Each structure stands twice: as structure tokens, then as C-alpha cells.
Image (cartoon, grey):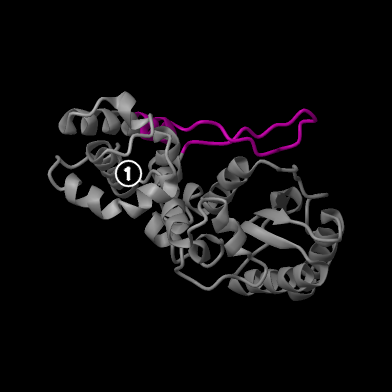
Amino acid sequence: MIVRGVDRREIFLDDADRVAYCERLSLVFLEDGASCLAWALMPNHLHMVVRTGPRPLARVMHRVGTRYARYFNDRYGRVGHLFQGRYKAIAVTDDEYLATLVYYVHANPLRAGLVASVDELDRHRWTGHAALVGCAPAAPFHDTREALRLFDEDEALARTTVRARMRCAEQAPDAEFAVEGANGDPVAAPVESSCEVDLALALTALIARVCTAQRIPEAELRRGSRCRPVSLARATIAYLAFHDLGVSLAEVARQLGVARQSLWERMDDGRRAASMLDAIPEIT
């Protein structure tokens, strides 16, 4: 969901305005049973991924917008509309797409140059990323538990995956979403970024290198064999993919045709085996 200022004018002039908006958002969401999975306040617009409750989204956002516009107009001695018509939104039911939207929304300050790096984004107050990776308390309206579950059932692994994806956004700042729907309104439709392609190729190369080093045919990895050499090769791949490439264990498990939990349980074995291999080069 995107909410813009009228004529693309700024709707947040300082931190007091941002606090005021978040307070009103928290109150209305609590009253109406809505929750937010991702959010980012920009100078003249805002992005949110919202899960509605009993009341329709239009009603919820009208209440938030009316309360904030009244505050803003009173503070700055202005009259008239603050927001540019109705918000722009699309319905999302696919969890993978939803996860992509979560980190896309949180990456907005990074892409816009409001922060210079992921390290700065970890401390940025006006997006939900800091709470999602455990660097700040969550805003009352931000449901970090549900957001993290989109990335992994294990909270620690989910936080690591979120940060790895944000590193990808940092490396490919120009990767964008399609912005025009059938009616000409902006929507969010993810496209494949060069960074994602690089990660896929790097994972393929990693699997091939580990299999060569440990003398395991690649086909054996995907046949469910539990013999020690094959299991050790999988563990090595999982460790290096997770720690060096930032690929989630869920994705590694999907590539290898095994359960994520089995890879997690053998990570220590993978770490020891990986120490005898050359370091995986960083993707540039």
C-alpha cells in the first residue's frame, strides 16, 4: 500500500510528525484489529504491508489519514487535503510474494539514499526493518512475529534471512518493482534482480564445488541418501550457503530435496568440513 502527499508534497517535516503519525496508526490499528507486516515513512509518502481485521482497509486508512491530517494542518496553520486521493493498494495472498514485499518496503530508505548502508538501516527509526532484525523495539502496530514467519519458522533464522536479503538490496540498489497496473495505478510486482540471479548461480557453483571436493555425485544429494559422506556434503553446502552467501536454509533444503531441520541439526558438521575448503568469494 502506498499513501502519497497531495501534489507529492512532504507529509512528514520532522520526527515529531513521524511520531504523531505512528501514534495515530497504532491507536486505529488496535481499535480496528489491523496489523502491519512492513512499513516505511518517506518524506512525501509512506509504504505499508497491512493485514486487515474486521473493518475494511479503506475505513481503517480513512480514520488514520483524517486524524493525522487534522494534526498536521493545526500544527502548520494550513487547510485542505494533505493526502493525494485514496491510497494505492493491491491484495496479496501468496506468502512468497508477501515476504518479497516486506523487505522491498523496508529497503525504501536505502534505495532513496536516506540511509547509506544496511548497518545504518538497522538503526533507522522510520521503517520496520530495525525491529524485524532485532535492533529496536517494534512499533505497536507492527506485527514482527507474523512478518518473520514469512521467512522461516525459526525466529533467529528468519532474522538472518531478512538481513541477507537486505544485503542483496544494498548490492543492487537499482533493482525495482513494476509500477503500473491494468488501470494505470501503481502496484507492486516483484521482478528478478541481478543480485537474486547471482545468488542462484553462486549456490549452483557452491554445490558443484563441494561435491567435487568431497567426491560426491551431485545426483546423490537429491536422492535422500543418509550415508555419512552425502550428509556431510549437504551440511557443508548448507553452512557455506547460509553464512557466506546469505541463502536461507529453506532455499538450500529445497534445492537439495531434504528437510530444513535436518540441515540445521548438522550445521556444526558443515562448519568443520567447510573450514577445509577455500573461502567462498563475495558476490560483486
- The quarter holding residue 69 reads bottom right
Looking at the rendered structure, the kind of residue marked 1 is: Ala
> Is residue 192 found left or right of 53 in the rendered image?
left
Magenta portion: prevailing SS class? loop
Q: Position of residue 179 (x, y in %)?
A: 65, 34
From this view, report whether residue 272 is shown above or below residue 176.
below
Front residue (pair 11, 244): 244
Outermost residue, left side: 276
Instruction: State the residue position of label 1.
Output: 238
From this view, report whether residue 32 is shown above or below residue 161.
below
Q: Is residue 176 magenta?
A: yes
| Picture residue at 79% right of the left edge, 74% below the top | 74
| Picture residue at 63% right of the left edge, 57% below the top | 37
Front residue (pair 264, 117): 264
Front residue (pair 132, 65): 132
From this view, report whether residue 7 is shown above or below residue 68.
above
Crowd tier of the residue under label 1, counting other residues whose Cα lies within 10 Å: few below 14, some 14–19, many 20 or above: many
Q: Position of residue 233 (x, y in %)?
A: 25, 38
> Is residue 28 found left or right of 135 in the rendered image?
right
Per the rendered image, the range of residues in magenta is 174-201
Q: Quadrant of the C terminus?
A: top left
> Is residue 219 found left or right of 163 in the rendered image?
left
Q: Position of residue 156 (x, y in %)?
A: 43, 61
